[in-house]
């Protein structure tokens, strides 16, 4: 039996997680998977009930479960809270607590969605890129940080920090993933300007020595952003820091048609994982039954593959998504003329039916 901590969070989080749970329940029935679902609180919803975006009970449940399935956190109503009480701090805190340093963000273009991509079809068809983002260090966590009064005005500052060991472990993750793919790692940094990136580049070179079968290249982040929209298929695995990975993976998302299509896994050294769509809580569309639940459903597939040892069933979930897209069903964000536009709930039901 596997215990899964389910954290819907805020905004569209509840709507998209509801669809993922339908899929899990169907998989339990169909394949006797015995996944036990335990609901918990995080983000704004947790703050409203407990006064904390990451209650101790959620931390205890996370340690007690085999993996976490998360919707999204955040929303306008919590934006004026002091920083440590904001929903996003809950998510960052949980990633840090469970040491989920390896964030895998695959950007795969489903052929049926080629016309939904922001790029020309010939540039994106067949796109299969894996962005490996370091998730628990770098400028999002570095100190000192803050906003103070200095020289008669407000002064804001953050610090980009990496220990060599933090770069090494994300490097090993990227190279090991590349060994199962096209055996190419492109490391993204800004070593021409930032000392922390010089260390990043030097460390990646050293890690590469353990993987002679994998080719390592380096690219500056500004060029990487340009190349992603110019010729995205040149990349196999991109490995990068927390901040650069956050930005580049949103950029890669649009190549696949919609941010609502991209799942992610965040793993620690024991392959304990948190699985979530890469998008946020989308308050602009929350409660309207129009959010695309496929990134969350595909996150369930990643959970089956990486944490629960069920690669074949993960493939079945991917195939079910394919079937539904083949049938012409689309949520609003990926719909083109002539498609059958469906809501969040119906898209979830269609994937469940396609699993049969
Ligand atoms: P967002 O990803 O929530 O939304 C960006 C745009 O994409 C919006 O127009 C939204 O409607 C659309 N979108 C997102 N997911 C979609 C889906 N599944 N289907 C269809 N359209 C979708 O980013 P944002 O607007 O910058 O942030 C909103 C809130 O989410 C903020 O509070 C932010 O801090 C938070 N956030 C949370 C996470 C997370 O929980 N992992 C990640 C990013 C942002």
Image (cartoon, helix red, strand yellow):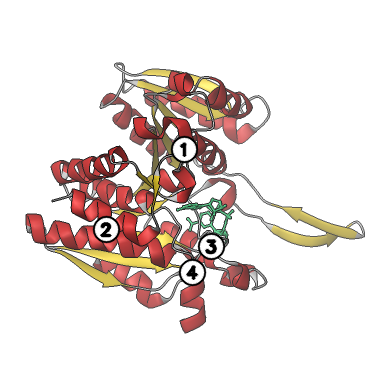
Residue indicated by mark 4: 43
The residue nearer to you, when weighing 129 against 159, is 129
Distance Cα–Cα, label 1 vs label 2: 22 Å
The residue nearer to you, when weighing 343 against 196, is 343
- Give residue 103's position: percent from left, percent from top: 40, 44
Q: Earlier in the sequence, mark 4 or mark 3?
A: 4
For disc 4, does the CB lie below 8 Å from ligand 1? yes
> Residue at position x 44%, y 35% from top?
256
Residue indicated by mark 1: 257
Residue 20 makes an appearance in the image: yes
Q: In the rendered structure, are the residues bearing label 3 and label 1 in contact, judged by CB atoms less than 8 Å apart? A: no
> Residue at position x 52%, y 31% from top?
200
Task: Classify 174 as above or below 78.
Answer: above
For disc 3, does the CB lie below 8 Å from ligand 1? yes
> Residue at position x 8%, y 54% from top?
31
Residue indicated by mark 3: 88
The residue nearer to you, when weighing 79 against 179, is 79
Residue indicated by mark 2: 349
Circle number at residue 246: none
Q: Earlier in the sequence, mark 1 or mark 4?
A: 4
Crowd around label 3: few <14 · some 14–19 · many ≥20 (10 Å): many
For disc 2, does the CB lie below 8 Å from ligand 1? no
Left or right? Give the position of 42 relative to 159: left
Task: Classify 345 as above or below 185.
Answer: below
- Give residue 266's position: percent from left, percent from top: 37, 49
Q: Nearer the viewer, mark 3 or mark 1?
A: 1
Distance Cα–Cα, label 4 vs label 2: 27 Å
Q: In the rendered structure, are the residues bearing label 4 and label 3 in contact, judged by CB atoms less than 8 Å apart? A: yes
Quarter of the image with the N terminus in it: bottom left
Distance Cα–Cα, label 4 vs label 3: 6 Å
């Amino acid at each position: 039996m596997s215990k899964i901590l389910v954290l819907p969070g805020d905004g569209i989080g509840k709507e998209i997680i509801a669809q993922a749970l339908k899929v899990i329940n169907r998989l339990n029935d169909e394949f006797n998977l015995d996944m036990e679902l335990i609901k918990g609180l995080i983000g704004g919803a947790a703050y409203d009930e407990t006064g904390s975006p990451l209650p101790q009970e959620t931390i205890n449940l996370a340690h007690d479960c085999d993996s976490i399935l998360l919707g999204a956190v955040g929303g306008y109503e919590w934006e004026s809270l002091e920083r440590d009480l904001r929903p996003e701090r809950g998510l960052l805190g949980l990633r840090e607590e469970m040491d989920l340093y390896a964030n895998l963000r695959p950007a795969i273009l489903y052929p049926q969605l080629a016309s939904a991509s922001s790029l020309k079809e010939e540039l994106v068809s067949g796109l299969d890129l894996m962005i490996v983002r370091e998730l628990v260090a770098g400028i999002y966590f570095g100190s000192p940080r803050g906003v103070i009064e200095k020289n008669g005005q407000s002064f804001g500052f953050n610090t980009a920090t990496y220990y060599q060991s933090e770069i090494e472990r994300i490097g090993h993750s990227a190279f090991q993933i590349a060994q199962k793919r096209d055996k190419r790692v492109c490391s993204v940094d800004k070593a021409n300007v930032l000392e922390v990136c010089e260390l990043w580049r030097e460390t990646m070179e050293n890690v590469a020595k353990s993987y002679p079968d994998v080719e390592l290249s380096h690219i500056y982040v500004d060029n990487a952003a340009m190349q992603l929209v110019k010729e995205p298929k040149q990349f196999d695995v991109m490995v990068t820091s927390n901040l650069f990975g956050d930005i580049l993976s949103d950029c890669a998302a649009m190549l696949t048609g919609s941010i609502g299509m991209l799942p992610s896994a965040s793993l620690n050294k024991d392959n304990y994982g948190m699985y979530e769509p890469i998008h946020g809580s989308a308050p602009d569309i929350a409660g309207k039954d129009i959010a695309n639940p496929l990134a969350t459903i595909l996150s369930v597939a990643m959970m089956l593959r990486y944490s629960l040892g069920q690669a074949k069933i993960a493939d079945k979930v991917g195939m079910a998504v394919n079937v539904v897209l083949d049938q012409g069903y689309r949520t609003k964000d990926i719909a083109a003329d002539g498609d059958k536009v469906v809501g969040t709930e119906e898209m979830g039901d269609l994937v469940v039916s396609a699993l049969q």
